[in-house]
Amino acid sequence: KQEVTQIPAALSVPEGENLVLNCSFTDSAIYNLQWFRQDPGKGLTSLLLIQSSQREQTSGRLNASLDKSSGRSTLYIAASQPGDSATYLCAPSTDSWGKFQFGAGTQVVVTP
Amino acid sequence: DAGITQSPRHKVTETGTPVTLRCHQTENHRYMYWYRQDPGHGLRLIHYSYGVKDTDKGEVSDGYSVSRSKTEDFLLTLESATSSQTSVYFCAIRATSGMPPEGNEQFFGPGTRLTVL
């Protein structure tokens, strides 16, 4: 069974700093991996989907890298803003049916 | 938001009663999923569907059943609700209507908060 670990569990940074969020997974034979954010009491918002054939994916201030051989993905958020405060979840899928295994998330607080 | 709605958004029920949650999508996506989210366990897959009348079990399917008689609706039924099924339930769709290519994002609904007393 795929085990997904996100480190750190919580992170507090001042506005403007870059954020680095780590995700590790035990089964490197992934199909793809998706990053989400979740605001308190809300649903999940898709941030980036990175395919197994890709090394990285970028969207605005967000960049996700994928190293399948080491079972790791990293989400970088440049020049953080208070609006980036949320819980960030990574979810790899090991089959074509889109069945995700979720990590517990990293709770981020960006202080003004 | 991929046109996903969930109903009801909140529900309180008693142990032993059946409960049905509805997920509705407006964009004709083939794949739909039900997850539950609990503190300490994160999000876990309950059931998923890959077409009308085509469903399969996920990681935590015991005590749940699903039905999909129309593309747009995916129903989750708790046959006899228990306190351990108190949770937030999320529906998701995969943004494709064809075969499962790898590059298809999943989008989530707003969730249903269920409390079983």
Image (cartoon, coloured by chain):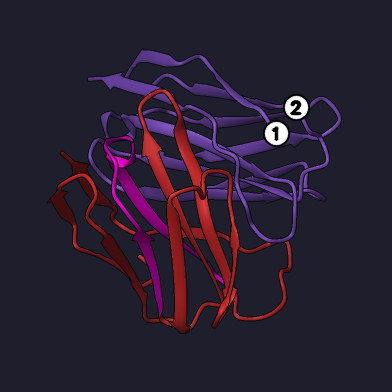
From the viewer's side, name the closer residue of B110 and A77. B110
From the viewer's side, name the closer residue of A98 and B8. B8
Mark 1 near mark 2, Cβ–Cβ under 8 Å?
yes
Which amino acid type corresponds to the residue marked 1 in the rendered image?
Gln
Q: Position of residue A27 (x, y in %)?
A: 78, 33
Q: Secondary structure at mark 1?
A: loop
Q: Tell me where the magenta segment starts and ends, as one range.
A: B73-95
Q: Is residue A112 above or below residue A35?
A: above
Say whether residue A96 is magenta: no
Q: Is residue A54 above or below residue A112?
A: below
Q: Residue at x 45, y 32 (%)?
A: B42
Question: Colour in which chain A is shown?
Answer: purple
- Residue A24 falls left or right of residue B73: right
Q: Which residue is mark 1?
A: A2
Letter of the chain in red? B
Q: Residue at x 36, y 14 (%)?
A: A13
How packed mark 1 is, by other alpha carbons closer than 10 Å (few <14, some 14-19, many 20 or more), is: some
Residue A26 - label: 2
Which amino acid type corresponds to the residue marked 2 in the rendered image?
Thr
- Residue B96 falls left or right of residue A38: right
From the viewer's side, name the closer residue of B100 and B55. B55
Q: Position of residue A104 (x, y in %)?
A: 48, 27
Q: Quadrant of residue B108?
A: bottom left
The chain ID associated with circle 2 is A
